[in-house]
Each structure stands twice: as C-alpha cells, then as structure tokens.
Image (cartoon, rainbow, N blue to C red):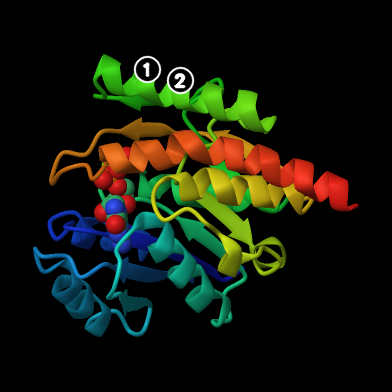
C-alpha cells in the first residue's frame, strides 16, 4: 500500500511542521500540501519541509479563487497522477490526529472510503464550544435528512479513499468550493456504489491559528443538500 495524505492549508505555518513530522513516521506515506497562497507564508514553510523530505512531501501552490473544496479537487487530481494507491485527506491544524491515519488505512482494506467519525460510538470532539458542536451535529442531521445519506459524520474531513473509487468520481463536476465539498464528495461516493465505512476518532479543536469557517461557507453548505437531492431526482428520471 502506498498512501498519500493530502493536506489543504491556509495560514497554518505553526501547525504544518508538527503534522508532517508525524505523518512521515508512517511507513511509505507521502504528503501533498495544497496551499492557497497563505498570507502567513505557510507555502514557504511547506517548500522548506519538502526540500528536506527525500521527496516524500510535495507542495501544490494554488492561485486564483481560494477554497477548501477547490484545493481538494486540485489536490486529488494531482494525487491521481502519482503512483499512490490510497489517498487520505485531513486538516492541517492537528484537529485530526496523525496517529489515527494507520487505523483509517487499515480499515480501507474493506472499504473504498473510510471516514474518521466523531459521531459513532467511540468518537468525540474535544475543546469544542457547545455552540460549535451543536452546529456540527445539526449540520450532519440536516444533510442526512435531505439527502438520505446514511453516514453519521458526513462533514468530516478526515478520510481515506481507495484509488479505484476516487478515480471514478466526477471531480471536474463538483460544484462546492468550500466545506460543503466533503458532503458532495461523500454523496458522489455513495452514488458510485462505493463501500463506505466509519471509524471513531477524537477531533480536538485547534490550539494555533484560526478557523476559516465563514457565513458564506455555511450558506453554501445549507443549500448543497437540496442540490444533491434534486440531482438524484434528475438521475432517476434519466434512467
Ligand atoms: N487550501 C485551503 N485550505 C483551507 C481553506 N480553508 C480552510 N483550509 C484548511 O482546511 C482545514 C480545516 O479548516 P479550519 O479552518 O480548521 O476549519 P474548522 O476546523 O472547521 O474550523 C485546515 O487545514 C485549513 O488550513 C482554503 O480556502 N484553502
Ligand atoms: Mg480546524
């Protein structure tokens, strides 16, 4: 198995070196940093880490419109051009514990998409405000109700994909630019008949830097499930 961990960054210069050091301890793992021209110089930090990594870290510097979804699409397209067999995705801010990656990778032996889940038994969040946790739980329930997806943590950004599934997904047709991307790609994975499993994780709130969750991102996330539901109706009609 050759895993490649895709890490989107925007202003994560303090967190990134800690994360990559931990990821490089995983045998044969590569890291792809997708930086959106971070004003704090995360891109330069990433380049320095890459130069010192024996080729295990690569960096994609994006320009143009920034966004988590846009970064993941570029990163996944780049990743599919490498010889990696499994692709993981995780936040750079250490909310996702790099020591959990081997557990997700092991689960990918039996699943095309493994999701690190806060909302199955054994999973939890740490140091999150009550408000943030309620928002996240509500968002998950809302997405499940509108789309019919049966995933407990459908907004989680900690995932591992088998190449066979990821390369079949219509990455060039994804409409979400922001966090809604996670929901849209899970939906595409289920539509493609992918086997999806969840493993419990502890999500710890970041200690350094700031969250980029904005009002605009939340509006996109609120509307996307309805777009997905109507996409399903169109697909059913066309069949
Ligand atoms: N490349 C890129 N990364 C982003 C963008 N927005 C957020 N991120 C990264 O996505 C991950 C999750 O973002 P974060 O702000 O921590 O969201 P939160 O955990 O939901 O509060 C972190 O690694 C961020 O640096 C963006 O516009 N572009
Ligand atoms: Mg975060």
Q: Image height check: is 53 above or below 184?
A: below
Q: Residue 71, image x and y in percent?
A: 39, 64
Residue neighbourhood size for the residue with mark 2, other residues' Cα within 10 Å, grouped as few (<14), some (14–19), many (≥20): few
* Relative image position of residue 177 (x, y in whole percent): 41, 56
Label 2: which residue?
138
Image quarter for residue 51?
Answer: bottom left
Q: Is residue 225 left or right of residue 230?
A: left
Residue at position x 12%, y 56% in the image = 14
Placement of 49 over or under 13, stated as above or below: below
Q: In the orientation shown, which residue stands out farthest toward the right?
A: 239
For the residues bearing labels 1 and 2, Cβ distance under 8 angstroms: yes
Does any atom of ligand 1 lie closer than 8 Å to the CB of label 2? Answer: no
Q: Residue at x 86, y 46 (%)?
A: 237
Q: Which residue is mark 1?
A: 134
48 or 164: nearer the viewer: 164
Q: Residue at x 34, y 43 (%)?
A: 217
Is 15 situated left or right of 89 in this image? left
Task: Name the spot of residue 74 as percent of width and height, x first.
Answer: 45, 71
Is there any visible trace of residue 25 in the rendered image?
no
Is any atom of residue 142 visible in this view?
A: yes
Question: Is residue 52 depicted above or below 121 in this figure?
Answer: below
Tell me the tag on residue 107: none
What SS does tag 1 mark? Answer: helix
Please rate how many residues cluster around mark 1, counting C-alpha atoms within 10 Å: few if below 14, some from 14 to 19, many from 20: few
Q: The N terminus appears in which quarter of the rendering?
A: bottom right
C-alpha gap between disc 1 and disc 2:
6 Å
């Amino acid at each position: 198995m050759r895993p490649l961990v895709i890490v989107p960054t925007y202003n994560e210069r303090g967190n990134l070196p800690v994360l990559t050091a931990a990821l490089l301890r995983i045998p044969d793992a590569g890291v792809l940093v997708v930086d959106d021209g971070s004003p704090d110089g995360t891109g330069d930090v990433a380049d320095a880490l890459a130069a010192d990594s024996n080729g295990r870290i690569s960096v994609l510097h994006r320009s143009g419109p920034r966004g988590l979804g846009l970064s993941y699409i570029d990163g996944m397209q780049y990743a599919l051009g490498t010889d990696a067999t499994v692709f993981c995705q995780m936040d750079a801010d250490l909310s996702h514990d790099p020591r959990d990656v081997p557990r997700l990778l092991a689960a990918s032996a039996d699943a095309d998409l493994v999701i690190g889940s806060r909302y199955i038994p054994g999973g939890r969040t740490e140091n999150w405000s009550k408000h943030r946790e309620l928002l996240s739980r509500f968002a998950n329930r809302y997405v499940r109700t509108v789309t019919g997806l049966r995933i407990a943590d459908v907004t989680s950004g900690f995932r591992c994909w088998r190449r066979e599934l990821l390369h079949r997904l219509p990455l060039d047709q994804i409409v979400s630019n922001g966090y809604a991307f996670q929901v849209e790609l899970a939906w595409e994975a289920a539509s493609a008949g992918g086997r999806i499993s969840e493993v419990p994780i502890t999500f710890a709130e970041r200690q350094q830097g700031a969250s980029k969750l904005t009002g605009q991102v939340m509006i996109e996330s609120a509307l996307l499930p309805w777009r997905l539901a109507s996409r399903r109706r169109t697909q059913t009609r066309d069949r």
